[in-house]
Image (cartoon, grey):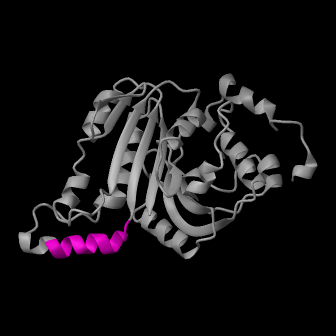
Amino acid sequence: MRFSIVTPSFNQLDWLKLCIASVRDQITNAIPAKAQPPQQTKSSFRSVSEEFQGISVEHIVQDAGTSGIEEFARAQGAAFYRNGEKIFEATDGVADDIANNSKPEVFKPYSLSIYSEKDLGMYDALNKGFARTSGDMCAYLNCDEQYLEGALKSVASWFTKNPTIDIAFGNIVVTDHRGNYICDRTAVMPSRWHTLTGGTLSMFSAGTFFRRCVVARGLVFDPTWRVVGDSIWILSVLRANLKGKLMRHRLAAFVYSTDNLSQQPNVQVIKPTHRWPARPFDPAQL
């Protein structure tokens, strides 16, 4: 199963570094160390392939023009693109570490690409990122969110056992900016009434995964929204009658701080919410 993870980014390089590491670690935690004796190489790689059973990850970062993003991309070993032009290839050693201990036909398990280009906000950035994905399973992870250890392995196993489910929602852990535990948050299946009137979503973006068919059907984000675009997207998913289910697993951590967009009480952020709902309200759609 191939995962496509998209991260919108702007002026959050410290958080982005942690976010990228949490995605990369889904694969690298199982890579045999280079220092292992040669006689252990074959058996060590076999444990990798058995552990991940064909899982690979492409991580696409859509950055709106952060100062220093090119240098950051080099430090991360990412492939880097500026305004659609490829500036340099990836130099991350993850794929090589496994390839050197495997048969030639084994796929490269991880890639990181960073695209620097203007956008209309995080939802436009997400749409640009998803247009570039190739995975069977899609998700989006904000800079201040991180996957927990083994999260993608758990998701892959769950979707394999639930082949008719299009989209699923997992649980998250909330921490403060220092990483101190605040609480667990448990996902609840979203409904139209609650999404329209509840003020908060009953699911969490960091714990949401969906199959390629969702993107293929054009269920993308409305870039005219700044804060409630996730809610608009969930309403479109509900209207499409996709098959959804709860995974009931802890999958990610979310950092609660004043840097979160939803916590910034400025006029530019709040103003778009005055358009809610986006079109004349029709109770029949509920």
Q: Residue furthest front?
A: 105
Quadrant, the N terminus: bottom left
Disc tally is 0
Residue 225, image x, y percentages? 68, 33
Judged by its main secondary structure, the magenta piece is helix
On screen, residue 136 versus residue 66, left or right, reads right
Residue 83 spot, x, y in % from top left: 43, 24
Q: Does residue 266 appear in the picture of this structure? A: no
Quadrant in which residue 67 is drawn: top left
Which residue is found at the position 23% from the left and 42% from the top?
Answer: 91
Query: In the depicted view, which residue is nearer to us: 211 or 182?
Result: 211
Left-right relation of 260 to 243: left
Q: Residue 229: percent from the left, percent from the top? A: 67, 39
Image coords of residue 160 (percent x, y): 52, 72
Instruction: Tell me the quarter of the picture where residue 153 sits.
Output: bottom left
Q: Residue at x 28, y 70 (%)?
A: 48
Residue 286 within the segment the image draws in magenta: no
Q: Is residue 127 above or below residue 137?
A: above
Q: Quadrant of residue 80?
A: top left
User: Range of the magenta residues?
Assistant: 42-54
Q: Residue at x 73, y 48 (%)?
A: 236
- Let me know if residue 261 appears in the view: yes
The residue that appears at 60% across and 55% down in the rendered structure is 213
Choose between 184 and 67: the one closer to the eye.
Answer: 67
The correct choice, above or below, for 199 with respect to 79 in the image is: below
Compared with residue 111, is residue 35 higher up or lower down, i.e. above or below?
below
